[in-house]
Image (cartoon, rainbow, N blue to C red):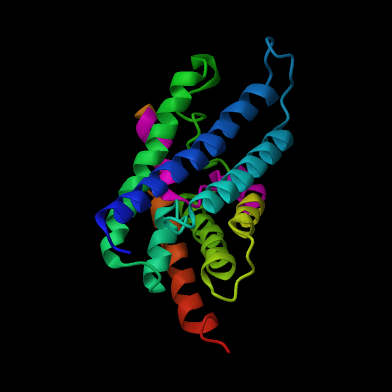
Amino acid sequence: MSSESDVTRRYAAELVGTFMFVFIGAGSAIASQYLFSSNTTTGFSTDPRAGLLVAALANGLGLAIAISATMGISGGHLNPAVTIGLLLGRKVAGRDVIPYIIAQLVGATIAGLFLMIVLPSSTGSAVNWGAPTLNTSVISIAQGTTFELIMTFFLVLAVYGTVVDRRAPKIGGFGVGLVVLLDVLVGGPFTGAAMNPARATGPMIASLSFPSYWYIYWIGPILGGALAGVIYHRVLENLS
């Protein structure tokens, strides 16, 4: 169907699904920072390994559930890089790309605003309101961009192979969520493993704070998503 009400439902699903994912994913970053850093109130000590595991599980499972909840309505993109990757694989109409991306950005920004509203100000800052952070002490901007490109390539490849392809196993968004979980374990300490321009930008907009390297979370994921879309559509999907 292409009725106006159906179009509205699809855009609303992208907004709500991205809100759900970013609230859980960004919220996990704040919660782990609060729990696993030295804090006389909580009594917990610094443990970056525990914080990384919490972030990986929350982002992976949060995305899996959000995709599963919305894929029957909008396709469960919840990520501008996924939308562009699906466009290049001819899985989404060109007229839907900009509205989908706007809905995703709005959902991510609302999630960031709600996190700022519901959590004590002592638990958040321009960095840990959930925006990813490039570890510039050990990795360059070029390396960070490439890291995000590769991780998003894996993510969009998983979207094609476990959600979009007619031959895909019927596991909802859980295959995609597992890739995100693993990507966060690998890339979290270096780039924050955003793999999603909306996931990165929403908390930045909410907190009105943009690091100098903010653009890597657009360039890397979009190039990675585009590359995955082209390769899957032209090479893998056409295999008999």
Q: Residue furthest bottom?
A: 240
Residue placed most toward the observer, 172 or 141? 172
Do we see residue 132 in this rendering?
no
- In percent of width and height, residue 99 lies at 29, 53
Q: Is residue 227 visible?
A: yes
Chief SS of the magenta region = helix
58 or 194, nearer to the observer: 58
Left or right? Give the position of 6 relative to 57: left
In this view, the residue farthest toward the top is 41
The quarter of the displayed image where residue 135 is located: top right
The location of residue 233, given as percent across then percent down, is: 46, 78
Position of 72 with respect to 174 (left or right) is: left
> Dividing the picture into quarters, in which one does residue 97 lie?
bottom left
Residue 217 belongs to the span the image colors magenta: no
* Residue 107 in the image: above or below residue 165: above
Residue drawn at the location 37% of the way across and 53% of the way down: 10
Rendered residue at 54%/62% (across/down):
150
Give the percent coordinates (x, y) of residue 40: 69, 10
- What percent of the width, then of the height, locates residue 239? 56, 87
Q: Nearer the viewer, residue 240 or 148?
A: 240
- Would residue 165 appear left or right of 181 to someone viewing this image? left
Q: Viewer-proximal residue, 126 or 8?
A: 8
Residue at horizontal 45%, vertical 39%?
A: 19
Would you place residue 172 above or below residue 119 in this image?
Answer: below
Quadrant (top left/top right/bottom left/bottom right) for the N terminus: bottom left
Residue 162 position (above or below residue 214): below
Residue lying at 55% horizontally and 60% vertically, measured from the top left: 155
What is the span of residues highlighted in magenta in the rendered image? 183-206
Is residue 199 found inside the magenta-colored segment of the image? yes
Q: Considering the image in quadrants, where does the C terminus appear? A: bottom right
The quarter of the picture where residue 211 lies is: top left
